[in-house]
Image (cartoon, helix red, strand yellow):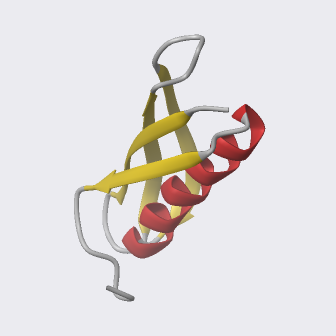
């Protein structure tokens, strides 16, 4: 098990509009992992949460002990 750091971001062109996410995970035994995905026609909040969920899912798959998340903006729940 490892300690991972995830950098996440999601955005849309228009709100809603064409959307994608980006995730970078550092600390993996296999090195830095980069993910970029098209997520369809969404709003900006959905894109932000989708990026976070992608990082959480990957951390589970990697058997991470901890995951520290850095994001570009504050979520409404903050």
Q: Is residue 24 above or below residue 29?
A: below
- Quarter where residue 72 is shown: bottom left
Tell how many labels: 0
Residue that lies at the very extreme toward the top in this rendered image: 30
Q: Is residue 54 above or below residue 77?
A: above
Image position, residue 4 (x, y; %)? 49, 37
Q: Residue at left 45%, top 54%?
A: 19
- Quarter where residue 11 is shown: bottom left
Q: Residue at left 62%, top 44%?
A: 65
| Residue 52 located left or right of residue 11 | right
Which of these two is toward me, 65 or 76? 65
Q: Quadrant of the C terminus?
A: bottom left
Image position, residue 67 (x, y; %)? 50, 49
Which of these two is toward me, 21 or 7? 7
Q: Is residue 2 above or below residue 72?
A: above
Q: Quadrant of the N terminus?
A: top right
- Quarter where residue 22 is shown: top left
Q: Is residue 28 above or below residue 41?
A: above
Q: Residue at left 35%, top 74%?
A: 15
Q: Residue at left 34%, top 78%?
A: 75
Which of these two is toward me, 5 or 51? 5
| Residue 74 located left or right of residue 35 | left
| Residue 43 located left or right of residue 50 | left
Image position, residue 13 (x, y; %)? 32, 58
Image position, residue 63 (x, y; %)? 73, 37
Which of these two is toward me, 47 or 64? 64
């Amino acid at each position: 098990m490892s300690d991972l750091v995830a950098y996440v971001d999601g955005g849309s062109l228009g709100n809603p509009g064409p959307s994608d996410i980006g995730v970078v995970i550092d600390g993996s035994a296999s090195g830095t992992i980069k993910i970029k995905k098209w997520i369809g026609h969404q709003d900006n909040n959905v894109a932000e949460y989708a990026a976070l969920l992608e990082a959480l899912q990957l951390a589970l798959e990697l058997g991470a002990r901890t995951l520290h998340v850095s994001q570009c903006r504050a979520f409404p729940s903050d």
